[in-house]
Image: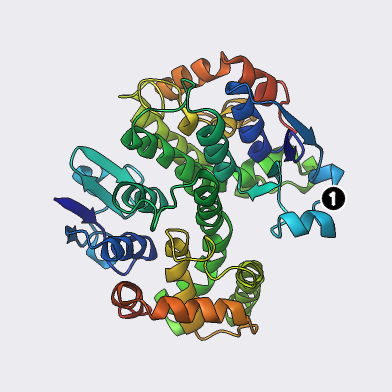
């Protein structure tokens, strides 16, 4: 059975777990990283020298980088599911949002999330958090631009390209921050939030 | 005709131009971004609201995110060569492509940007040296992979090497202290033997 190594409070682990449930792929998950540690132990580093989570073990095939894991699992086990766009062009177009979530959406979100959720109140740098929030908002505005003309990041239907951005957008809507009005992002997020696998693996985990 | 919008001095544009040269695909290119500007204009933002380069127009597809463009071109025009046909082999390539985005590139920026794009009096040498040391730690991870693999994706040159290549040029050419990473050096020398890499990365230099 597929093994997923990584704590379920990591947004990068959440992407992979959520994907597996969307395509009904059974897996076993073990807690690693964050408060659980273990990610700097030699046996983990032998699998993943970056010491980050997640790492997957698919019957001996080892892979890390969460977006690469999502692409691999959906291609191998999910091609007959509705979240696999049938044309290469649609997969490329939807897939760009996976890279974009790594390059553009996640970096400004990190100081906001880390500052407000994983830093004691007395140690928070509120000016730095406010500056990062502005960058986070600018990135969400790019989603608004696309979603004004498309139901989903993957096009007309929900696809695997929608997955990496969504845990960050959950944080956008749930962190105690000022939020501009992005009605199309709200509509897209509501559609994502209605998916049982997202609710279970992202919303119900909450901000930790 | 395939159109690439973006200045050829951007490491992200280099990935795309190098891929096109490896495939032998005809294209046109417009200088946008950096000193050329244009990436803040409404007509560019209408294609790519991030305002970054490159953007590629391939018939009715408008695509950005450089690694996505490399994947698209490789899958469409070079299946079983730049883009492995096997799902697992391809996933191993994509892992290193994603690693370039998530780990290696953010560590390159605080080394490259001050050394190349800031006047000497505005540089903080201690901060640059510390950033270069951290960047080296990341290269060490890739060097470890190359101890057992000729290329990022395994035994042969693939799309996995392409996002890493422009950064490797900067690593070896910038005036910084470098740990001895022999496997990385061997891989870099193999890239430098490729005419398409020399034309689209090495010849452009550090700008």
Closest to the observer, B33 or B179: B179
Q: Is residue B88 above or below residue A90?
A: below
How many labels sit on residues? Answer: 1
Identity of the residue drawn at 63% across and 34% down: A16
Closest to the observer, A178 or A163: A163
Q: Which corner quadrant of the image does residue A51 belong to?
A: bottom right
Quarter holding the C terminus of chain B is bottom left
Closest to the observer, A121 or A79: A79
As drawn, the residue found furthest toward the left would be B1
Identity of the residue drawn at 49% across and 30% down: A160
Q: Residues within 10 Å of mark 1 (few under 14, many from 20)?
A: some
Q: Is residue A80 above or below residue A43?
A: above
Q: Which corner quadrant of the image does residue B126 belong to?
A: bottom right
For the question of whether residue B46 can be seen, the reply is no
Position of A149 with respect to A118 (left or right) is left
Identity of the residue drawn at 29% across and 51% down: B77
- The x and y percentages for residue A57 are 71, 43
- The chosen color scheme is rainbow
- The x and y percentages for residue A9 are 74, 34
For the question of whether residue B94 can be seen, the reply is yes
Q: Chain of mark 1?
A: A
Position of A154 with respect to A8 (left or right) is left
Q: Report which residue position mark 1 lands on.
A: A38
Position of A182 with respect to B141 (left or right) is left
- The x and y percentages for residue B130 are 65, 75
Closest to the observer, A66 or B121: A66
Identity of the residue drawn at 64% across and 26% down: A25
Q: Is residue B103 above or below residue B85?
A: below
- The x and y percentages for residue A129 are 62, 45
Q: Which corner quadrant of the image does residue B163 belong to?
A: bottom left
Q: Secondary structure at mark 1?
A: loop
């Amino acid at each position: 059975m597929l093994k997923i190594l990584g704590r379920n409070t990591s947004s990068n682990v959440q992407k992979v777990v959520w994907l597996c449930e969307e395509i009904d792929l059974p897996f076993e998950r073990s807690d690693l990283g964050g408060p659980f540690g273990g990610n700097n132990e030699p046996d983990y580093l032998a699998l993943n020298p970056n010491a980050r989570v997640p790492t997957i073990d698919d019957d001996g095939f080892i892979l890390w980088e969460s977006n690469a894991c999502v692409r691999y699992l959906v291609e191998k086990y999910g091609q007959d599911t509705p979240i696999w766009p049938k044309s290469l062009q649609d997969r490329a177009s939807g897939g760009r949002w996976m890279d974009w979530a790594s390059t553009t959406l996640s970096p400004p979100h990190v100081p906001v999330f880390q500052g407000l959720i994983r830093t004691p109140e007395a140690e928070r740098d509120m000016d730095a958090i406010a500056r990062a929030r502005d960058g986070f908002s600018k990135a969400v505005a790019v989603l608004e631009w696309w979603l004004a003309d498309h139901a989903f990041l993957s096009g007309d239907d929900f696809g695997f390209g929608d997955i990496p951005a969504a845990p960050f957008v959950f944080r956008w809507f749930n962190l105690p921050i000022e939020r501009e009005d992005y009605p199309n992002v709200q509509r897209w997020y509501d559609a994502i939030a209605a998916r049982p696998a997202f609710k279970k693996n992202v919303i119900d985990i909450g901000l930790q | 005709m395939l159109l690439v919008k973006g200045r050829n001095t951007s490491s992200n544009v280099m990935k795309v131009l190098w891929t096109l040269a490896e495939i032998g695909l005809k294209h046109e290119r417009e200088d946008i971004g950096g000193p050329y500007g244009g990436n803040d204009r409404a007509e560019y933002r209408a294609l790519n609201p991030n305002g970054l380069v490159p953007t590629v127009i391939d018939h009715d597809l408008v695509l950005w995110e450089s690694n996505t463009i490399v994947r698209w071109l490789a899958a469409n025009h070079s299946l079983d060569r730049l883009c492995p046909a096997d799902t697992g082999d391809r996933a191993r390539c994509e892992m290193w492509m994603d690693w370039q985005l998530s780990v290696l590139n953010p560590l390159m920026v605080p080394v490259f940007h001050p050394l190349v794009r800031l006047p000497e009096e505005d540089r903080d040498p201690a901060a640059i040296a510390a950033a270069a040391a951290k960047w080296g730690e990341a290269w060490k991870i890739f060097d470890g992979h190359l101890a057992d693999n000729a290329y990022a994706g395994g035994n042969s040159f693939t799309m996995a090497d392409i996002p890493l290549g422009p950064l490797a040029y900067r690593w070896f050419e910038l005036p910084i202290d470098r740990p001895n990473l022999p496997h990385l050096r061997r891989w870099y020398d193999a890239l430098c033997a490729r005419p398409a890499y020399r034309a689209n990365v090495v010849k452009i230099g550090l700008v």
